[in-house]
């Protein structure tokens, strides 16, 4: 009888231990499941935006060399549609000696253009020699630069009318410019006779 009682108690203890161990395991699994569910969810990284939905393309730049009677001569990069007065401002403005009256400050600058701002004294000396005033946009040392001169500057050359000036501009835009002054003879309407009359008044 005592043996039967001990067996019954031992069986009860084993069952209780098994039952408690199973609950512990189950409780541990549940806690692990909860921990997994509470783990923060991370989304895939989004691309960094640098302002605006789409990046705007930078405007085209041209490089202009301005020298002479300005405070800070040099080469400046400006927007393609910039005017001469903007380039002058970048160069620190005109000096007190500059001959501002000879400049067309509203002139649109072009890539590779050299602008020589002369002084009033230099303009006077050129006038004494029978040359035009300050060279400004399309001129250098009193000569008209056929690669950069405006329509008005080209027509100021004796023998070059408006139609020929337009032909010069069209040719240089089509071919990329003149390499020598003799290349101007490739323009329709300009032959050896006219070239001999204007060769001392033009440059490249």
Image (spheres, rainbow, N blue to C red):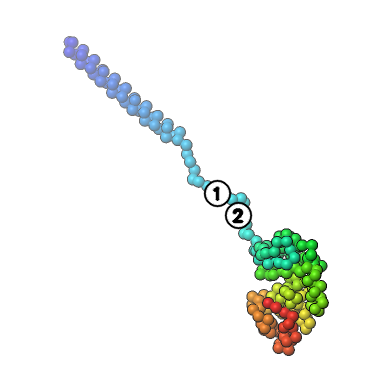
Q: Residue at x 74, y 77 (%)?
A: 143
Kindly check if marks 1 and 2 are in contact, taking CB atoms under 8 A apart as contact.
Answer: no
Instruction: Indicate whether 83 appears above or below 34.
Output: below
Q: Report x, y in % for residue 134.
A: 77, 71
Write down the quadrant of residue 133 in the picture. Answer: bottom right
Q: Which residue is drawn at 76% across and 62% down?
A: 94
Q: Which residue is drawn at 40% across and 29% down?
A: 31
Determine whether the residue tagged by mark 1 lies in a helix, strand or loop: loop
Q: How crowded is mark 2: few (under 14 residues within 10 Å), some or many (20 or more)?
A: few
| Comes first in the chain, label 1 or label 2 | 1
> In the displayed structure, does residue 39 sit left or right of residue 6?
right
Which of the two marks, 1 or 2, is nearer to us in this view? 1
Q: Residues within 10 Å of mark 1 (few under 14, many from 20)?
A: few
User: Observer-nearest residue: 1 or 127?
Assistant: 127
Q: Report x, y in % for residue 7.
A: 20, 16
**Residue 120: in sight, yes or no?**
yes
Q: According to the image, label 2 marks what residue?
A: 54
User: Observer-nearest residue: 38 or 73?
Assistant: 73
Q: According to the image, label 1 marks what residue?
A: 48
**Separation of marks 1 and 2 at Cα, in angstroms:** 12 Å
User: Observer-nearest residue: 88 or 11?
Assistant: 88
Of all residues shown, which one is farthest toward the bottom? Answer: 193
Determine whether the residue tagged by mark 2 lies in a helix, strand or loop: loop
Instruction: Indicate whether 195 appears above or below 173.
Output: below
């Amino acid at each position: 009888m005592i043996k039967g009682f001990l067996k019954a108690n031992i069986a009860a203890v084993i069952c209780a231990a098994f039952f408690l161990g199973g609950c512990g395991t189950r409780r541990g699994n549940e806690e692990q499941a909860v921990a997994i569910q509470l783990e923060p969810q991370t989304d895939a990284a989004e691309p960094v935006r640098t302002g605006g939905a789409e990046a705007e393309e930078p405007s085209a730049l041209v490089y202009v060399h301005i020298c002479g009677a300005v405070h800070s001569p040099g080469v400046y990069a400006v927007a393609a549609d910039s005017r001469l007065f903007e380039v002058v401002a970048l160069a620190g403005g005109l000096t007190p000696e500059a001959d501002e009256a000879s400049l067309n400050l509203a002139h649109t600058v072009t890539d590779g253009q050299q602008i020589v701002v002369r002084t009033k004294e230099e303009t006077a000396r050129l006038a004494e020699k029978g040359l035009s005033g300050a060279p400004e946009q399309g001129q250098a040392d009193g000569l008209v630069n056929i690669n950069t001169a405006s329509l008005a500057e080209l027509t100021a050359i004796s023998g070059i009318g408006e139609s020929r000036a337009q032909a010069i501009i069209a040719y240089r835009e089509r071919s990329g410019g003149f390499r020598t002054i003799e290349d101007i003879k490739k323009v329709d309407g300009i032959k050896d006779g006219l070239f001999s009359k204007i060769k001392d008044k033009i440059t490249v």
